[in-house]
Image: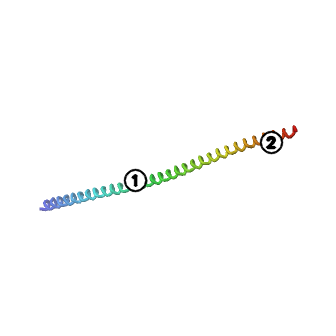
Amino acid sequence: MLFLWLLTSAIIMCVISMVMCAISMVTFAISMVTVTFAISMVTFAISVVTCAISIVTSAISMVTCAISMVTCAISMVTSAISMVTRAISMVTCAISMVTCAIFTCAMSMVTRE
């Protein structure tokens, strides 16, 4: 009788142990899913941050490009102004040379008389 009681107790303890093991496995599976979800959330957050950094970098690049284009336009305008100034200088020099030639010619005519 004592043997039967011990056997029954052992079977009951084994069943309880198996149930506890099953509960532990289910809890572990749930925690794994939760950890996976947390990892996925962290990965998503990193992805969002990377995307934001990419957008900011793109905006900075666009601003730099716009500044470069404005600088290029200013350089072209300055170059055009320089060319016009050079042309005016050449015309002034030519007028000066013609005036000098006329003056020299007039002086030589005055000196002859």
The three-letter amino acid code for the residue at tag 1 is Ser
Q: Secondary structure at mark 1?
A: helix
- Establish if 33 lies above or below 84: below
Which mark is drawn over residue 105?
A: none
Dividing the picture into quadrants, the one containing residue 11 is: bottom left
**Residue 65, position as x, y percentages in the image:** 52, 49
Residue at horizontal 55%, vertical 50%? 70
**Residue 85, position as x, y percentages in the image:** 67, 46
For disc 2, the marked residue is 103
Residue at horizontal 68%, vertical 45%? 88
Q: Which quadrant is home to the N terminus?
A: bottom left
Q: Nearer the viewer, residue 15 or 53?
A: 53
Which mark is drawn over residue 47?
A: 1
Dividing the picture into quadrants, the one containing residue 45 is: bottom left
**Residue 7, position as x, y percentages in the image:** 15, 59
The three-letter amino acid code for the residue at tag 2 is Phe
How would you rate the neighbour count of disc 1 (Cα within 10 Å): few for under 14, some for 14-19, many for 20 or more?
few
Locate residue 7 relative to residue 92 in the image: left or right: left
- How much space separates mark 2 and mark 1, taking CA atoms? 82 Å
Q: Residue furthest front?
A: 113
Q: Nearer the viewer, residue 84 or 56?
A: 84
Residue at horizontal 48%, vertical 53%? 59
Q: Secondary structure at mark 2?
A: helix
Q: Which quadrant is home to the C terminus?
A: top right
